Amino acid sequence: MRERIIFRCSECKEENYIGDKNKRLHPDRQEINKYCSRCNKQTVHKEKK
């Protein structure tokens, strides 16, 4: 079953992106590099708890 996850900027803590993943196959948290409009640069976005 796929569940919706929210990605949060690691610098300013802004919640910018929404994604989904299969938590049964991938139980660990994801990290992606995405553009943050608040920081005006590309930062690491981590999966919110």
Image (spheres, grey):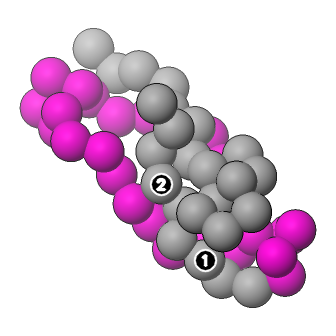
- Considering depth in this image, is 13 or 28 the residue closer to the camera? 13
Q: Quadrant of the N terminus?
A: top left
Q: In this figure, which residue is indicated by the disc labeled 1?
A: 43
> Magenta stretch?
17-40
Depicted 44 relative to depicted 7: above or below: below
Residue 47: % across, % down: 46, 45
Q: In this figure, which residue is indicated by the disc labeled 2?
A: 46
Q: Is residue 38 on the magenta stretch?
A: yes
Q: Is residue 42 visible?
A: yes
Q: Residue at x 39, y 60 (%)?
A: 31
Q: Dot 2: few (<14), some (14–19), or many (≥20) neighbours within 10 Å?
A: many
Which secondary structure, mark 1?
Answer: strand
Which secondary structure, mark 2?
Answer: strand
Residue 12 sits in which quadrant?
bottom right
Residue 32 sits in which quadrant?
bottom left
Q: Amino acid at mark 2?
A: Lys
Q: Taking 33 as reference, is 43 left or right? A: right
Q: Residue at x 87, y 68 (%)?
A: 38
Residue 2 sits in which quadrant?
top left
- Considering depth in this image, is 21 or 30 the residue closer to the camera? 30
Q: Amino acid at mark 1?
A: Thr
Q: Is residue 18 on the magenta stretch?
A: yes
Depicted 2 relative to depicted 46: above or below: above
Residue 10: % across, % down: 58, 63
Q: Dot 1: few (<14), some (14–19), or many (≥20) neighbours within 10 Å?
A: some
